[in-house]
Amino acid sequence: MDMALGHMANERLMTPGPTQLPEQSRLAMARQVRHHRTEGFRRLFGEVVEGLKYVFQTQNDVLILTSSGTGAMEAAVASVVPRGGKAIVLESGKFSERWRLICEAFGVCVVKHTVPWGEAFAPDDVARLLADHPDAQAVYTTLSESSTGVAHDIEGIARVVRQTPSLMICDAISGAGAIECRTDAWGIDVLVVGAQKALMGPPGLAFVAVSPKAWAKIESIDRRAFYFDLLAYRRAMAESEPPYTPAIPLVAALAESLRQIRAEGIERIWSRTGLLARATRAGVVALGMKLAAARPADSLTAAFFPEGIDGKEFLRRLEARFGVKLASGQGLWKGKILRIAHFGKIDELDILSTLAAMELTLAEMGQPVKLGAAVAAASQVLVSAASE
């Protein structure tokens, strides 16, 4: 009997974006829309900016764009490096590849440095690249490469970059709010983040944190963008409002999520996410699956499907039978890996139930798994942490 057919359970969203929303955030979007050129909205907008500064650990300007994270990435290229300028792109997966594609679209001369998927960049390699290319105006990199589950040593890379005239530009879309990210202390000049991941916001908002060093560069080049012109956003920020009509319900929802984040405390969230990550990895390994990342990010777990298992069919059955939605692989690893998030509104029971559902699905597909092994391995991590 095909147990995957017949009904759909309530969906449990375990993907690395979009993530599940807190109830208060969902309810905020049901309120009547207010006008964005009012004192009430300016106060709300200002609160959101301050909340984002807290999460990003920065006193730099934080700009709010109505777009996906990719829009903020485009702004971080079009407003920062002139046509014909040189930039180093550290490419290790599908999303860091996007930095290169955007740079090429805007006529930037790209120095591409790659590592095999699943591997992480070494700061010493970045130092050599900067020595070989002293005219590079920016280094584009990624905090958490969510296509492979790798966390890069952004603190170490930034330490190298800040000793040069180059700007350190980091995609933290799937990492900020989940894993340690200290924008100012590390020296990140431009940080790009999306709302729909660890910030527990609805998709449609993106953020760019800009350092004084980056503003000096932005002011010195010819403007090549209109909607994504970061200078336009900075001018509007003087009035605590965006330059164009924002997605007002999304801002209201994000405000609720940021209040919850501040109430719990960002360092406590980093610690909690790390615990869930360790438990998830232990459970996945107990299922006989191989982790994809040599330096795993605590924001998500990426693992290869067991030999002989059709990944697409596994994910279909898992969702149809249990309502558990995981992400598949992308690019080179499409159909080869699954990806489980452990950030945002995800708790221990979400992790344990997801692992139990994975066990049952694999067993129903004929995989020789020891039922209870994954849950037991994850539970042992959680129990050990609770007793410390």
Image: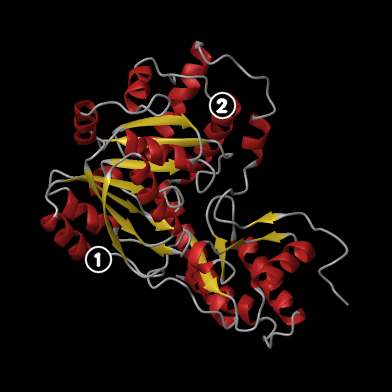
Coordinates of residue 227 in the picture (x, y in percent): 43, 25
Mark seen at residue 271: none
**Residue visible at 52% across and 18% down in the picture:** 41
- Residue 279 visible from this viewpoint: no
Please tell me whether residue 88 is drawn above or below residue 215 in the rendered image: below
Coordinates of residue 211 in the picture (x, y in percent): 25, 35
Look at the image and tell me in which quarter the C terminus lies: bottom left
* Position of residue 7 in the picture relative to residue 27 (left or right): right
In this view, which residue lies farthest toward the top? 38
**Observer-nearest residue: 148 or 100?**
100
The residue pinned by badge 1 equals 122
Give the class, few, some or many, for how many residues have Cα within 10 Å of label 2's Cα (few <14, many ≥20): some
**Observer-nearest residue: 301 or 109?**
109
**Observer-nearest residue: 41 or 138?**
138
Coordinates of residue 39 in the picture (x, y in percent): 49, 11
**Callout 1: helix, strand or loop?**
loop
**Residue visible at 65% across and 30% down in the picture:** 29
Look at the image and tell me in which quarter the N terminus lies: bottom right
- Residue 296 visible from this viewpoint: yes
**Callout 2: helix, strand or loop?**
loop
Among numbered discs 2 and 1, the one appearing first in the sequence: 1
Please tell me whether residue 309 is drawn above or below residue 12 in the rendered image: below
Give the class, few, some or many, for how many residues have Cα within 10 Å of label 1's Cα (few <14, many ≥20): some
Please tell me whether residue 213 is drawn above or below residue 366 in the rendered image: above
Residue type highlighted by circle 1: Ala
Q: Are marks 2 and 1 in contact (CB under 8 Å)?
A: no
Residue type highlighted by circle 2: Ala
The residue pinned by badge 2 equals 247
Q: CA distance from mark 2 to mark 1?
A: 39 Å
